[in-house]
Image (tube, rainbow, N blue to C red):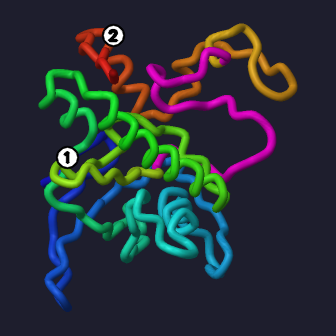
Amino acid sequence: MLGEGSFGSVYEGKRLEDGLEVAVKIARKPENMKYIYIPGHPAQVPLEVGLSILANRGPKVKEIIELLDWQDQPDQYIMVLEHPSPCKDLLDFLNHHDGSLNEDTVRFIMAQATTAAHMCCRRGVFHRDIKLENLLINTETLEVKLIDFGCGDLLQESGYERFCTLDYCPPEYYMSQVGVGQARLRSPLNHCHPEERIKEEARGRSKRNSNFIFY
């Protein structure tokens, strides 16, 4: 198993036709499962699947994890994704380097993360949860890939009022008024994705040091 979260698990696998190493994500569907329409698909698809398809549509962007196949089932959906090797998420990578990276390395990582975010926006996808845990890094080449579109949304011109990880919310999110139409916020935690809300509550009980030096 590569990873496990509140809504599912990610496993290592191999594609039978050519032995390609892949990651298989099996995600349980919550009661409020969101579906979206995307061009080329007559029926609605799960949000994460749809955003991954859109982010991969067009010329390949090596900074975005590639969706190889997917399947929608009544109580879960399955995604088959590329699995770069050797790799780990950027949080583990930082921990391995005592929380500090030199400036050249950080510049190289950030350039790739920025490219991934830019291409997502150009393809109509707002990832909404770009953070250390959602960036895979090849430990040999330092190539970075953006993963996990489960908290994303379709890109829109108006503002957003829901974010997924409080540690990375913009400052405006904590102000008494935010976004288009000056909509008032009740509590930032109330607007978080259920999985991230659980994580944030857990952090309140057992605070983890997440301060890393990037220079």
Q: Count of labels shown?
A: 2
User: SS class of the residue under badge 1?
Assistant: strand
In the image, farthest residue toward the right = 181
Residue pictured at 61% horizontal, 15% vertical: 171
Amino acid on which the number 1 mark rests in the picture:
Lys
- Residue at the disc numbered 1: 88
Give the answer, above or below, for where 92 lies relative to 198: below
Give the camera-side residue of 161 and 130.
130
2 or 1: tag closer to the N-terminus: 1
Q: Circle 2 sits in a helix, a strand or a loop, which is it?
A: helix
Up-down relation of residue 33 to residue 46 (above or below): above
The residue at the far front in this view is: 104
Three-letter amino acid code at disc 2?
Answer: Gly
| 29 is higher (above) or lower (below) than 185 | below
Task: Look at the image and tell me in which quarter the N terminus lies.
Answer: bottom left
Q: Residue at x 49, y 62 (%)?
A: 52
For label 2, count other residues whose C-alpha is less than 10 Å away and answer few (under 14), some (14-19) or many (20+).
few
Residue 43: x and y in percent read: 62, 76
C-alpha distance separating marks 2 and 1: 26 Å
- What is the magenta range? 150-172
In this view, the residue in front, 13 or 66, is 66
Look at mark 2 in the image and give the residue it sits on: 204
**Which residue sits at x=50%, y=68%?**
56
In reply to whether residue 163 is colored magenta, the answer given is yes
Judge left or right: residue 197 versus residue 92.
right
- Mark yes or no: residue 212 visible: yes
Q: Nearer the viewer, residue 19 or 47?
A: 19
